[in-house]
Image (cartoon, rainbow, N blue to C red):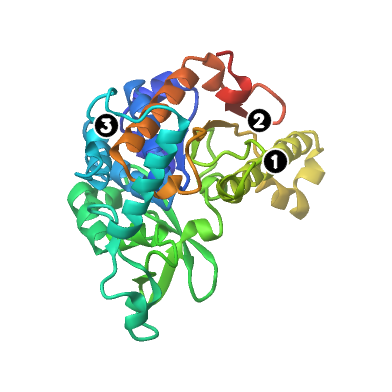
Amino acid sequence: MNVQSQKKFGTAESRLPFECVALVLQGGGALGAYQAGVYEALAEAGIHPDWVAGVSIGAINSAIIAGNEPAERVAKLRTFWREITANPLLDWTAATDVLAPKGNLPRALFNQFSAACALVAGAPGFFSLRQPAPWLHSDGSLQGTSFYDTSRLKSTLERLVDFDRINAGGMRFSVGAVNVRTGNLVYFDNETHTIRPEHVMASGSLPPGFPAVEIEGELYWDGGLVSNTPLQWVVEHGTRQDTIAFQVDLWSARGEVPSNLADVAARQKDIQYSSRSRAHTDQFKQYQRARHALASLLSKLPADLLASEEARMLGGIADHKVYKLVHLIYRAKQYETHSKDYEFSRLAMEEHWRAGYFDAVRTLRHPEALSRPDNLDGVSTYDLAVDGRE
C-alpha cells in the first residue's frame, strides 16, 4: 500500500503543505489521555493523519483513531477513557471543581490513593488483578508470569475499534512490540500484517504487570522496553514524502533535580522513557541533513560520474524531501509522582485530556509550527515550550 494513495479526507492537504501527516504516540499508561486531547484539537483544526503509529497506550489510542470514521474518533476516545477511569469511590472528585482536592499535598495524597486503587482493583475494561496470584500458577504459563489479567482489554478493543477498517488501509497503522524470545523490536503494520486486537494488546503488555501476548507462535511484550516512541519507524519505513509528524510524548526529559526518594523515582521514569525519543529525533535530523547534502552533491556531478554504480547506489539514499517534527510533550504537575502512569482517576484523566487539547491549540496557533522547513537540511522541529511565544 502506497501512503500517497491514502488521501481521503482532503482537509489536511488544503491546510498543510505536506504530502503526509503522521501522528506518533508514545507509551505512558494513564497519561495517554493527553494524546486524546491532542487529537481532539487536531481534528477540530481539520488535521487528519494519514499515518498513525503508537507504542503501549499510544497503540491503543492509535487503534481507536485508525479504526473509526473521522467524525466518530473523538467520541470513541472519550468513551474509552471514561470507561477505564470509572471508579465509584473516586468519581465524585471530577463531578465539580468544588469537590476536587486543592493544593499540592492534598492532590498528591489523592493521586497516591487512586494509584493504589488501580494496583488492587485494576482499571475497568482494561486490566484486573489476577486471581489466584501468579505464584499459584504453574511455571511457564502466562498466568504465572504476570500480576494482572488483560482479557477485558480485548473485549474493549473489539467493541470500540473496527479492525476491518484498519486492515482496509485507508490510514497507515503501526504499533511496536518486543519479541520476548529474541528481544527484537517488531512493528505490526497494516501494510504487512492483518491487524487484530492481539497486536494492539502486545504493544501494551508491560511486564511483569501484564502477560505476554501470543501472535503466530511468538510471545510479545510492550514495545517501550526497547523504544518508547515509534518516530524512527515512521521516518525510516514509509514512502519518502514531504512529511509533518506530530510527535506526542508523555514523558518530559526536562525536569527539576529530585529532593527525595519519591522525586527520584518519578524523575527516573521521565528520563528513561523520554531519552530514546530525544535520541531518535536527533539521529533522524542528522540523517536527514546527510540525505539532503548528498542529493545536492549528486546534482553537481558530471554525467559520467552520475552514471557510475556508486552514484546510482547513493541516489537511492539521497532526496530533497522535507520533514517537520512538531513536539507535544506532557509536562507533569508538581503533585504527580512516580505513580502517574497508573493513576487512573477520572479527575487525572480529565486534566491530562485538557492539557493535551490546549497544548495542541496553542501550538496550532503559531504558523511556523505547520510551515515547511526552509533550511538546507530539509528538517525542522517545533516545540511550543522552546519555540513558542506564549
Label 2 is placed on what type of residue?
A: Gly
127 displayed left or right of 226: left
User: Which residue is denoted by mark 1 in the rendering?
Assistant: 291
- Residue at image position (75%, 36%) is 293
Q: Is residue 95 above or below residue 281?
A: above
Query: In which quarter of the view is residue 121 placed?
Result: bottom left
294 displayed left or right of 357: right
Q: Viewer-proximal residue, 25 or 245?
A: 25
How crowded pointer 1 is (Cα within 10 Å; few <14, some 14-19, many 20+) is rated as many
Q: Is residue 325 above or below residue 216?
A: above
Q: Viewer-proximal residue, 221 or 272?
A: 272
Mark 1 and mark 2 in contact? Answer it, CB < 8 Å.
Answer: yes
Q: Is disc 2 placed on a helix, strand or loop?
A: loop
Gap in angstroms between the C-alphas marked 1 and 2: 9 Å
Residue 146 seen in the current view = yes
Label 1 is placed on what type of residue?
A: Arg
Q: What percent of the width, then of the height, locates residue 328? A: 51, 31
Gap in angstroms between the C-alphas marked 1 and 3: 50 Å
- Residue at image position (40%, 62%) is 205
Q: Is disc 3 placed on a helix, strand or loop?
A: helix
Q: In the rendered structure, find residue 378 and report the number of the disc placed on it.
A: 2
Q: Is disc 1 placed on a helix, strand or loop?
A: helix
Mark 1 and mark 3 in contact? Answer it, CB < 8 Å.
Answer: no
How crowded pointer 2 is (Cα within 10 Å; few <14, some 14-19, many 20+) is rated as many
| Nearest-to-viewer mark from 1 and 3 | 3
Label 3 is placed on what type of residue?
A: Ala
User: Which residue is denoted by mark 3 in the rendering?
Assistant: 94
Query: In which quarter of the view is residue 217 placed?
Result: bottom left
Q: What percent of the width, then of the height, locates residue 332? A: 50, 35
Q: What percent of the width, then of the height, locates residue 318? A: 68, 42
Q: Is residue 86 above or below residue 244?
A: below
Q: Earlier in the sequence, mark 1 or mark 2?
A: 1
